[in-house]
Amino acid sequence: MFRKHLLILLLPAVGCASVSRKVDTIRWQCDPRDVVFAVNGAGGFHGLSDTLQSEISRQHVPLAVATFDWTHGYGRVVADQIDHAHIRCQGVRLAESIVTRKQNFPQSRILIVAHSAGCAVALAAAESVPLGYIDRMVLLAPAVSTGYDLRPSLRASKKGIDVFTSERDGYLVLGSVFLGTVDRCRMCPVAGRRGFEPIVQSAEDSILYAKLRQYAWGRWAIPAGHYGGHFGAYHPRHLRAYVLPLLIRP
């Protein structure tokens, strides 16, 4: 099984070699603490990772943050949204970083927090790593379709996947209408608005989807600065109240 995953990781590496952006290794490469990979959305904006780093530092949470840059470049939102091959390739790059981290610090937990189109990169990475290498994934406003098959990612994540959605997310409506979801589904409902639809074809699938937890936006989120928009899930107060507690659980 491990050889199989190594082949998955190594074979596409040539196609990814031309990408100059890398995981920010300065802060976490030699840090033995648990690490959270922050995967921002399309366009090369660092709203999620910067806010996450700020709140982790402010709250003195013992986590190292690794910002994973995967986009075509600053402001290139459309290219990031429609280039599915690029997203899969960057998912492999993230998987390589996760495997390296686990080999260097086997006792360190590996967490992923992703936003919007970055959720597709995070899911592609989870589909490429050995089982159990990821401890928990948190997806904020995922820009993939509701029918996306989460079973491979749920197998890879020990504590499962937490998803924050909002029916008020207008950005996801516009993106899906004009560009489709990032997993190349035209005119499909978006998971970031409706949540994921479980694919249950066996008893094992039922067990896997028991590790999927979805939180639909409600008025309960307003005091935390989340008014239902596309970027509300990583508002500092919302991260502090609802996301950080998920990351620090054993």
Image (tube, grey):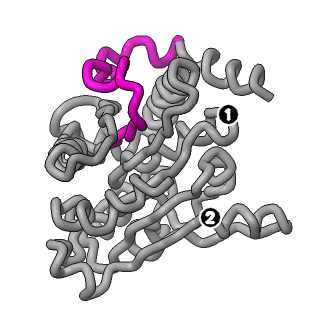
Give me the residue at 42% from left, 37% from top: 34
Percent coordinates x, y for residue 241 in the rendering: 26, 68
Give me the residue at 16% from left, 60% from top: 236
Of pointers 2 and 1, the one earlier in the residue sequence: 1
The crowding category of the residue bearing disc 2, from other C-alpha atoms within 10 Å (few below 14, some 14 to 19, many at least 20), is some
Q: Nearer the viewer, residue 105 or 164?
A: 105
**Which mark identifies residue 130?**
1
Q: Is residue 209 magenta?
A: no
The answer to whether residue 18 is above or below residue 99 is: above
Percent coordinates x, y for residue 27 in the rendering: 26, 24
Q: The residue under label 1 is which amino acid type?
A: Pro
Percent coordinates x, y for residue 224 in the rendering: 18, 74
Q: The residue under label 2 is which amino acid type?
A: Lys
The answer to whether residue 173 is above or below residue 104 is: below
Q: Which residue is mark 2?
A: 211
User: Of helix, strand and loop, which mostly describes the magenta segment?
Assistant: loop
Visible residue check, residue 142: no
Left or right position of 48 against 5: left
Q: Which SS class for mark 2?
A: loop
The crowding category of the residue bearing disc 1, from other C-alpha atoms within 10 Å (few below 14, some 14 to 19, many at least 20), is many
State which quadrant residue 235 falls in.
Answer: bottom left
Left or right position of 25 against 105: left
Q: Which residues are magenta?
A: 14-39
